[in-house]
Image (spheres, rainbow, N blue to C red):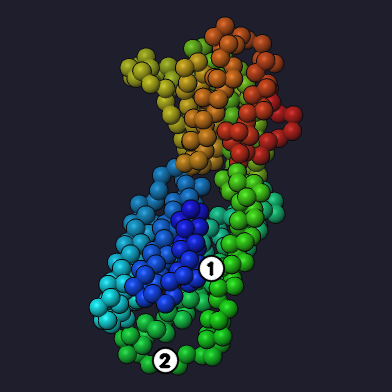
Amino acid sequence: MIFGLLAGIISIINELFFKNIQIIWYFFQSLHLNLYGFHFFFFFIFFERLVSKNLNSLRLSLMTSLLLIQTIGLWLVYYYRLYSMSTDIAWVLADFGYWTPALFVYLGLGVPIYFKMYLYTKEIKPLALMVALIFVSIGFFISFLNDLYFIFSVFNISINKPDIISTLEDISNIFPSIGIIIFVIIYITNIDYLYRLPYDVHLLMVLERGGGTPLYTVKLKTRNKIEIEDVLLSGLFSAINTIFQQVLQSKKIINVISSKEMSILIKGGKSIVTLVITSKNTYFLDKALARFVKIFEKEFEKELKEGERDLTIYERAHEIISIAFPFFILEKNNQS
């Protein structure tokens, strides 16, 4: 968002103050387009971390390569302009490195994620975010069509450009503007909503670190319902952790118990161990779980130190769930 904002500001300043000073105008044009490239790149990382703990190496390589192509192309354009050289090939590189990542990130990643989120939550906001990204994608697709005819001309491929393409070019900036406005409105009204996960997270449980006694459990609203016995879950963790610590001589708490369809994420603090059952582990879920452990231990520092076993005391942990997990959808009256 910061890179996108900087790109917009620089573009406006350039048009208002430096349009008649070619050297400066050329520089800021390359700079603001390059900043948009970084905007696409970091949006890619955000979307990847919504659906996975680790970045996909193939997609990361693709996005890094496209950002590099765009950067080289844009600054070659600036260099060639200074020396009155032909910028055609440089613009081909710059254009390819501009609309390709934009379409890939917005249309290829963002739209499917928010559509899946809408199917999961049945809420209006993910649908609005999806529509916003579609509008932005339409604008970039029109730019792609226009740049395509330019690329053909650079390589002496003669293709007639339909009048409708030229007409759409005149209004192409309207679509991204509409999309950005929708996205920003949702962003500033509820920033945490952007981190809503499109996967089921079934349960969160807090255990005493020493004996494995359950202190607090909260069940979450999910599309696919599964029955989870608290006692069995705490017993499973204690048994597996005992194997690792005593049999395998590992001093650390295990981090994850995983199958193809379900995972149990585990984070240990000084006094507690917190478990989360989820259909998929993601970067933001992993970080939120670590944050929850810190907040819980700070909130109940006295009770944990004294070994308090009155579970009703820990029920106020329900109030800090939304702080650590803004993307959780809570069932009513489910804290215990």
Callout 2 secondary element: loop
- At x 66% / y 39%, what residue is drawn? 329
Q: Residues within 10 Å of mark 1 (few under 14, many from 20)?
A: many
- At x 50% / y 74%, what residue is drawn? 141
* Relative to 286, 80 lies left or right: left
The location of residue 75, given as percent across then percent down, is 31, 68
Say whether residue 225 is visible. no
- Where is residue 234, by image quadrant? top right
The residue identified by callout 2 is 159
The location of residue 103, given as percent across then percent down, is 48, 66
The residue identified by callout 1 is 137
CB-based contact (under 8 Å), mark 1 and mark 2? no
- At x 45% / y 93%, what residue is drawn? 160
- Furthest residue to the top? 306
> Which residue is nearer to you in this view: 94 or 157?
94
**Relative vertical location of residue 286 with respect to residue 179 in this rendering, above or below:** above
> Which residue is nearer to you in this view: 304 or 9?
9
Q: Residues within 10 Å of mark 2 (few under 14, many from 20)?
A: few
- At x 51% / y 77%, what residue is drawn? 142
The location of residue 298, given as percent across then percent down, is 55, 20
The mark nearer the N terminus, 1 or 2, is 1
**What kind of residue is marked 2?**
Ile
Q: How far is mark 1 from mark 2, CA to CA?
A: 24 Å
